[in-house]
Image (cartoon, rainbow, N blue to C red):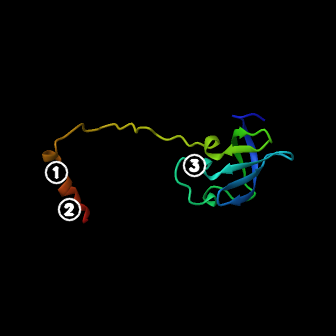
Amino acid sequence: MNVGDIVKGRITSIKPYGAFVKINDEVDGLIHISEMSDGFVKSIEDFLTVGDTVDLKVIKITEDNKVSLSYRAANKRGRKKYEDVQLSEGFKPFETMLPKWIEKHQKSGK
């Protein structure tokens, strides 16, 4: 196992600061809470439960074989950077569209 590898691990314990993981019979590791998500993590249980088997990225191995793992690096969800918008009517000035919107709103009863 090397830094950068994606490994499967089973969650064995969850603490407020991270989750302990069994990678194989000889290797255990830790996912620090900061490696759960790019956003704020209130509770690790929002992502994992004891017994889950998940893909993890090895981010550090110390000289005494302590393995640091990242859940977020191995489970990134692609974000859309933009949305492709196709205009069917083109741009119409506000004055032109306002009466149509008012009429549509009145017909819908809202």
Q: Quadrant of residue 65?
A: top right
Drawn side of residue 43 relative to residue 8, left or right: left
Secondary structure at numbered mark 2? helix
Q: Residues within 10 Å of mark 3 (few under 14, many from 20)?
A: some
Which of discs 2 and 3 lies nearer the camera? The answer is: 3
Residue 19: horizontal and vertical position, in percent? 70, 54
> In the rendered picture of this protein, how many numbered marks are placed on residues?
3
Q: Position of residue 70 (x, y in %)?
A: 65, 44
On the image, numbered disc 1 is attached to which residue?
98
**Of callouts 1 and 2, the N-terminal one:** 1
Residue 107 percent location from the top left of the image: 22, 61
| Quadrant of res 60 | top right
| Mark pair 2, 3: CA separation | 45 Å
Which amino acid type is shown beneath numbered disc 1?
A: Leu
Residue 106 marker:
2
Question: Which of the two residues, 16 or 12, is positioned nearer the viewer here?
Answer: 16
Residue name at image x 54 percent, y 47 percent: 38
Amino acid type shown at disc 2: Gln
Q: Quick check: 9 left or right of 88?
A: right
Which secondary structure lies at badge 1? helix
Outermost residue toward the front in this view: 63
Q: Name the quadrant of the C terminus.
A: bottom left
Eye-nearest disc, 1 or 2: 1
- Vertical order, 79 against 45 (above or below): above
Residue 37, which numbered label? 3
